[in-house]
Amino acid sequence: MKGFTLIELLVVITIIGILASAVLISFPGAVQRAQDSRIVSDMSQLRTKASILYANEGNYGSVQCTVSNKICSCQNSDIKVLCDDIEQESDEDITVNVNDDGKGFCAVAHLPGSGKYFCVDGDLRAKEYLTSPVLGGACAADCRGDNDCSCE
């Protein structure tokens, strides 16, 4: 008589179950890392678009965004698209600040997968921080305040 015994079938089903559970355990981490990567990519695109706007307009004024409760209000439609995408992926509002003279900007977003914060600025710097460099709605600490936004 040909075929598999009940014990052989149960062993195969058990092995498949163990392999499937291992994949499902690592899957949430992969999703969070993908979210972080998308946010970092969007922030880099924001920095590039801001540089183009600065070259065309001579200041970063149109980079300014007001963000509250996952709603971005931005002067520039391209910046708004990036802001909206970051808001969709992140668990905190993005902060985008422009210096009073329009000669500098910095943007900070939370990376939910790693728990870090990612900052980009008008000097083409990008940096990750363990804690938020944003205090009181203005770039502060390492993402400088007082009319000197930058990631250092």
Image: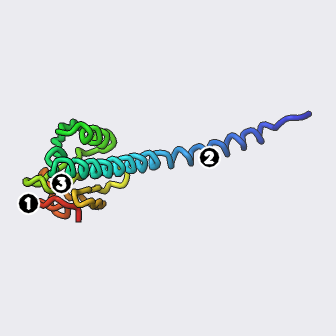
Q: Amino acid at mark 2?
A: Ile
Q: Amino acid at mark 1?
A: Asp
Please name which of the two marks, 3 or 1, marks the residue nearer to the observer: 3
> Which is more toward the observer, 41 or 134?
41
| Secondary structure at numbered mark 1 | loop
Q: Marks 3 and 2, Cα distance to the nearest angstrom? A: 50 Å
* Image location (x, y in percent) of residue 31: 44, 45
* Image location (x, y in percent) of residue 112: 33, 49
Which residue in the structure is indicated by mark 2? 18
* 144 vs 19: above or below: below
| Marked residue nearer the N-terminal end (3 or 2) | 2
What quarter of the picture does the N terminus occupy?
Answer: top right
* 88 vs 111: above or below: above
Is 135 positioned to the left or the right of 25 in the image? Answer: left
What quarter of the picture does the C terminus occupy?
Answer: bottom left
> Which is more toward the observer, 127 or 46?
46
Marker disc for residue 134? none
Whether label 2 touches label 1, CB < 8 Å: no
| Marked residue nearer the N-terminal end (3 or 1) | 3
Which residue in the structure is indicated by mark 3? 105
Which residue in the structure is indicated by mark 1? 146
Please name which of the two marks, 2 or 1, marks the residue nearer to the observer: 1
Q: Quadrant of residue 116?
A: bottom left
Is 147 positioned to the left or the right of 42 in the image? Answer: left
* Image location (x, y in percent) of residue 146: 8, 60
> Which is more toward the observer, 13 or 7?
13
| Secondary structure at numbered mark 2 | helix
* 116 vs 20: above or below: below
Whether label 3 touches label 2, CB < 8 Å: no
> Which is more toward the observer, 113 or 14?
113
